[in-house]
Every structure is written in structure tokens, then in C-alpha cells.
Image: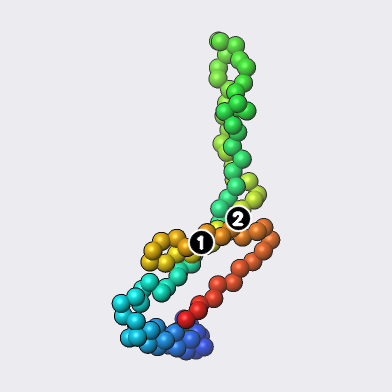
Amino acid sequence: MLADVQKADRTVISANLLILFNEYPDNFISRFVTVDGTWLHHFDPESKAQSMAWKHVTSPPPRKFCVFVSACKVMATVFWDSGGTVLIDYLEHGRTITYITLI
């Protein structure tokens, strides 16, 4: 379901990768950096001291409520190569990111 322009781009990229593989077969894979992003939600859990409550010995324990996801979330973008993680970047609230492919 790719557009003709997208198909042409993939053909050019594949041809460039084949050229790189033929020129550098020993370290071909080590030249790649991959990227992926995920949304991380902020939680605001209580500390142990904050969750403590005074009660009588015969009183039932206080009810604990579920921790809900807050309205805040942040995009974590992870870059890695064949050697492991290269960079983890956290995007500022309200900013956007555009991924590009470099060959």
C-alpha cells in the first residue's frame, strides 16, 4: 500500500545498502544506528511516610487506592547500534520529532 514515491525511495535505499555491503562486508552491520520511541507516563506514588496513617489497634487498615496515570507523559527516543545503546533522549513537553534515514 505504498505510494509510488515511497516505493522508489525504498528501491534507491536498498541499492545504496547493497553498494555499502559490497564495499564493506566485514563491518556492514556495525555502520547502522536504529531508533525507536515510546511514550512514558508519569506516576506520582506516595512515599512510605506519606502513606502512613494513625489508627487505633482495633481499627481496620486504611484503604489504599490505585495509582492512576497522570496527565503528563514524555517521549523517550532510544538510539542503538550493534554495540548497544548509543543515546536515550527525552523529548520536552510540547515539542515534536521527525525521524530521517541517513545513508
The amino acid type, in three-letter code, at marker 1 is Leu
Tell me the residue that label 1 is attached to.
87
Q: Nearer the viewer, mark 1 or mark 2?
A: 1
Picture quadrant of residue 64: top right
Q: Which mark is residue 15?
A: none
User: Residue at point 45% right, 60% down?
Assistant: 85
Is residue 64 or residue 99 the one in the foreground? Answer: 99
Mark 1 or mark 2: whose residue is earlier in sequence? 2
User: Residue at point 50% right, 77% down?
Assistant: 101
Residue 33 x/y as whole percent: 45, 70
Against 43, residue 88 (above or below) is below
Residue 50 in sight: yes
Is residue 98 or residue 68 the one in the foreground? Answer: 98
Residue 94 x/y as whole percent: 69, 61
Q: CA distance from mark 1 to mark 2?
A: 16 Å
Picture quadrant of residue 30: bottom left
